[in-house]
Image (tube, helix red, strand yellow):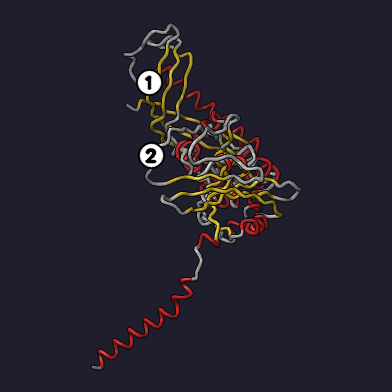
Amino acid sequence: MSKNLFNKIILFAVVLFLLILAPSALNVPSQTAVRAICTGLAIDKGSQEGQVTVSAQILIPEAGGQYTQKLSMVSQDGETVEDALELMEYQVGKKIRLAHCNFIILGKELCEQQNIATVMDYFLRGNNIANNTLLIYSDKEAKELLSKSSNINTNEVDNLQVIAKHNEKYVFSGNANLLSFYHDYLSPQRTSCMARITIKENGDTDSSSGTSGSSDNGESGGSSGGGGGGSSKNTQSDAVLSDGSVAVFYKGKLARILTNDEREQFNWFDSKITGTIIKLTGISDKVLNNADLAYSVTNKKLKFDYQVVNNIPTIKFKVDVGLKLEMVQQEDETSLTNYDNSISEAVSNAISTKIENDVQNMMKIQKEYGFDVFNIYKPFNIRCHSEWQKYLKSLENPEDYMKNIEVFVESNVYSAL
């Protein structure tokens, strides 16, 4: 009897508890009604001196037979990023939430004139955004690039996340996200890299489902349908351009844009990057006669030896490169279908010379601008600490440590097949 009574008391207590809470729970508004979901940000130099322009791409779910999404872009000027976001909340009537923000685009003028580490301090210090949020450089207005692309855009070639992730794997292996940027900025090297993505001059998109143009008030909207439905016959041309170039930041400001060719020169020091195409011209040996060849780098093994000799930092760099033949063209247009993948002495010498020239040019660029893409400071400081510190003290400005570093290159080229 007492057990049944106890169970009834528990049941009545649960029912009473639910009756008390149910009315307030039923009156809670939808989260999308009070919060704006931001999927991407763009930051530009403001229209007035000392200001920044922040643009947010806001995702708005819409009810219907099928799940659809609407994108609206809102921009505001402010003394700081947080000021602009606060003014933006007044404009949209919702709190701007950045938990789903996948990328931040930085405009050219902002990167050249201001320290972006200071500009973005709000994001990292207040933990207002994910640390793995991608950073992307645009040599146009960041706002314009944001309006041309979206992380939910049905056009895959305009997906900034896809492009940036591909670049981290095949263009430069350094992580170009918020946390890695500040990690590099606060280290002695103070050098960071990020993908350069721009807009095609003729990048107007064709008529297509899921896109719409910009309105006169500076906002742009579009929808992207999900699930089911028939396929659209319309196509969408690519609006953004990524050509393999990389933006290098030093002390928080844009230092230099590495072209695709220059970036490939830097990749000799990056063991994680393979698949690069090497082109040779005018090669002659026992089989070839003034031929053009193309090889892909399938394997790459690097070895570095760091020493300070007579107060001069030196790097002995050895690289073993495995190559796969991709193309052969003779001057007389003779077909060389039977030409095997073996590496002749002429080819080996040509590639070794190319590696030597590429590495020396890479060091020349770094010495000219003072940045240190591969954090050479760290291994010198660890492996020969006392000699390295003595070298730094001998410099008028210890931050100019790159200018006297010498690199000696030894290469071994072999067929990967």
Residue that extends furthest to the right in the rendered view of this protein: 49
Quickly name the residue at label 2. 230
Distance of label 2 from label 1 (alpha carbons): 53 Å
Q: Please tell me whether mark 2 sits on a helix, a strand or a loop.
A: loop
Count the numbered circles shown. 2
Q: Which badge, 2 or 1, comes first in the chain's sequence?
A: 2
Point out the image quarter for the C terminus: top left
Q: Residues within 10 Å of mark 1 (few under 14, many from 20)?
A: some
- Is residue 87 positioned above or below 342 on the image? below
| In-image side of 283 versus 396 (left or right) | left
| Residue 395 at x, y percent in the picture | 68, 44
Viewer-closest of 238 and 197: 238
The type of residue carrying mark 2 is Gly
Dot 1 corresponds to which residue? 343
Residue 33 relative to residue 340: left or right: right
In this view, 90 is above or below 240 = below
Circle 2 or circle 1, nearest the eye:
2
Amino acid carrying mark 1 in the image: Ile
Q: Is residue 5 left or right of residue 16?
A: left
- The residue closer to the viewer here, 195 or 298, is 195
On the image, the x and y values in percent for residue 337 come to 33, 13
Horizontal and vertical percent position of residue 84: 66, 55
Q: Can residue 381 be seen in this snapshot?
A: no
- The residue carrying pointer 2 sits among few (fewer than 14), some (14 to 19) or many (20 or more) residues within 10 Å by Cα, namely few
Q: Residue furthest front?
A: 65
- Relative placement, left or right, of 336 versus 101 is left
